[in-house]
């Protein structure tokens, strides 16, 4: 019998999930929650095999990490509309064992829950293909420090002072880093750091911690349009070069 706890912010979805799982003799839904406040408490108390989490907006890395902390042996499945390959990679690195689209049929939801409960990793074919055709870029401690300082908005002179190197060396390091991660300028490098931050490590002084990142096929990070700056993008965007 598969023990399961599910969360969705939509009461109608909660009713549908409860009806679906109660009709399955091999799934025991411990509770279907539509209130986040009780989710961690329920997971901590019951230690379910599978936790199905509905995602209606940006991924809540803090919630994912908290679920893993409260019940390390539980297998988290994200139930969402869409996800970028880079975020899916980070989610798997963070311990998520299933990524399930909301457009799939009820039968596929049950299949995903069963496969994940058996210890398998559930990803749709397009994500699997992206992982196989993409590449992983390792970022050194020094490179992460540079990304952090750029994300904080420091100019080359200020970066040189903090890192105890010359401005010329900063420019060389930045040029190499741009090429390595496939970005065009400081703005994109700052957003790269934000998007690629390791959720398990959390921010350092308000800036991202980057150890490695998955880059989809094509040889560069996903292009970023300046016209689509979000509040977070504006917060992490760097000032103009000296």
Image (cartoon, rainbow, N blue to C red):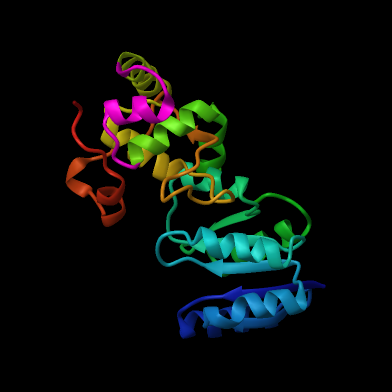
At 48% across and 50% down in the image, what residue appears?
203
Q: Position of residue 67 (x, y in %)?
A: 64, 66
Closer to the camera in the image, 55 or 67: 67
Please tell me whether residue 172 is drawn above or below residue 1 in the rendered image. Answer: above
Q: Is residue 66 left or right of residue 74?
A: left
Q: Position of residue 161 (x, y in %)?
A: 36, 27
Q: Position of residue 13 (x, y in %)?
A: 50, 79
Closer to the camera in the image, 154 or 233: 154
Q: Quadrant of residue 195?
A: top left
Q: Is residue 239 left or right of residue 163?
A: left
Quadrant the N terminus occupies: bottom right
At 48% across and 64% down in the image, what residue appears?
102
Please tell me whether residue 179 is drawn above or below residue 58 in the rendered image. Answer: above
Q: Is residue 187 left or right of residue 57?
A: left
Q: Is residue 232 left or right of residue 34?
A: left
Q: Position of residue 189 (x, y in %)?
A: 34, 33
Whether residue 207 is in magenta: the answer is no
Which segment did they paint magenta?
152-167
At 28% across and 31% down in the image, what residue appears?
186
Whether residue 158 is in magenta: the answer is yes
Q: Is residue 115 visible?
A: yes
Q: Is residue 101 visible?
A: no
Closer to the camera in the image, 206 or 14: 206
Closer to the camera in the image, 62 or 47: 62
Please tell me whether residue 67 is drawn above or below residue 197 in the rendered image. Answer: below
């Amino acid at each position: 019998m598969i023990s399961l706890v599910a969360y969705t912010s939509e009461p109608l979805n909660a009713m549908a999930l409860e009806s679906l799982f109660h009709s399955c003799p091999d799934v025991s839904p411990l509770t279907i929650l539509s209130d986040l406040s009780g989710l961690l408490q329920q997971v901590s108390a019951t230690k379910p095999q599978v936790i199905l989490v509905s995602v209606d907006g940006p991924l809540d890395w803090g919630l994912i990490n908290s679920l893993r902390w409260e019940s390390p042996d539980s297998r988290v499945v994200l139930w969402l509309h869409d996800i970028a390959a880079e975020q899916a990679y980070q989610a798997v690195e963070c311990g998520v064992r299933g990524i399930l689209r909301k457009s799939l049929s009820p039968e596929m939801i049950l299949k995903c829950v069963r496969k994940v409960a058996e210890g398998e990793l559930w990803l749709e074919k397009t994500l699997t293909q992206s992982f196989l055709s993409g590449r992983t870029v390792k970022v050194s401690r020094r490179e992460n420090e540079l990304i952090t300082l750029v994300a904080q908005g420091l100019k080359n002179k200020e970066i040189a002072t903090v890192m105890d190197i010359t401005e010329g060396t900063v420019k060389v390091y930045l040029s190499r880093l741009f090429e390595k991660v496939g970005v065009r300028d400081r703005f994109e490098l700052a957003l790269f750091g934000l998007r690629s931050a390791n959720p398990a490590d959390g921010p350092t002084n308000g800036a991202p911690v980057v150890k490695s990142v998955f880059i989809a096929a094509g040889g560069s990070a996903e292009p970023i349009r300046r016209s689509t700056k979000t509040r977070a993008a504006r917060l992490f965007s760097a000032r103009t070069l000296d």
